[in-house]
Amino acid sequence: MSVVIADDHPLLLAGLAHELRQHPGVKVVGSASNSTELVELLLRYPVDVVITDYSMPGGSRGDGITLFGFLRRRFPNVGLIALTMMNNTGVIRSLMTQGINCILSKADSLDYLTAALYCAVAGKRYLSPTIEAIVTAHGIDGRNQGLRARDLTVRELEVVRLFVSGLTVSEIAERMHRSKQTVSTQKMSAMRKLGLARDADLIKYGIDEHLTSHVIEPGIAHGQSFGDPDR
């Protein structure tokens, strides 16, 4: 099984590579620190599975749902495993409705990585314990094709996540390859649905709902467990 791994934290990349190399049937083809490097690797090497961080700023293909959507369209035969430190139900629901059914929390043990690999190749669902608990507690069903009417859309949720992470509307538009007006409209729609009137309230909502685990600076790429508690 050939695998590419991606994360913007070198120590986590090293930990993933070390764990995977303990299994004779798994070959780590390469590692990437942003979406640009990840896509370049996938264009050069045919692989079975991609293991990538959900929040991985700095690349030309963005991160989050934007990146996963691109990978699904451009490399439909590659299994995808999402790594995340966020436990927001909207993020997990968005991944599952996009067909990303193998999701691992960085708070869980690396021991779950191997099982996730084989499930990704087989097209089956695999959730690490932290993610499974969230899915069970909130009744998230990946078979549903849309979000519940009262929830934010996938794009609205992604705009809020990036805004809370410290990006401006213009920077979000550039990262998502959309117009500034479209992003502004999605941001306002999200605020209206949430009953929020000020940007400060939206930021508080994002932090309270664990839509980000750290604030990034625009333009800067940003048993054992998956590691870094700041993620």
Image: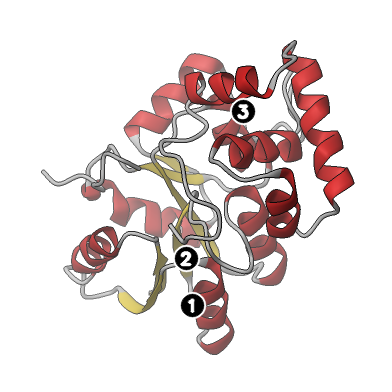
- How far apart are labels 1 and 2 at the CA level? 8 Å
Name the disc covering residue 47, or none: 1
Name the disc covering residue 50, or none: 2
Which residue sits at x=57%, y=55%?
Answer: 63
- Residue 179 appears in the figure: yes
Secondary structure found at label 2: strand
- Residue 149 appears in the figure: no
Q: Nearer the viewer, residue 140 or 59?
A: 59
Q: Nearer the viewer, residue 14 or 223?
A: 14
Q: Position of residue 104 (x, y in %)?
A: 39, 44
Picture quarter with the N terminus: bottom left
Name the disc covering residue 141, or none: 3
Q: Nearer the viewer, residue 20 or 61?
A: 61
Considering only vertical position in the picture, is 55 above or below 138? below
Q: Which quarter of the picture shows residue 97?
A: top right
Considering only vertical position in the picture, is 141 above or below 112? above
- How far apart are labels 1 and 3 at the CA level? 28 Å
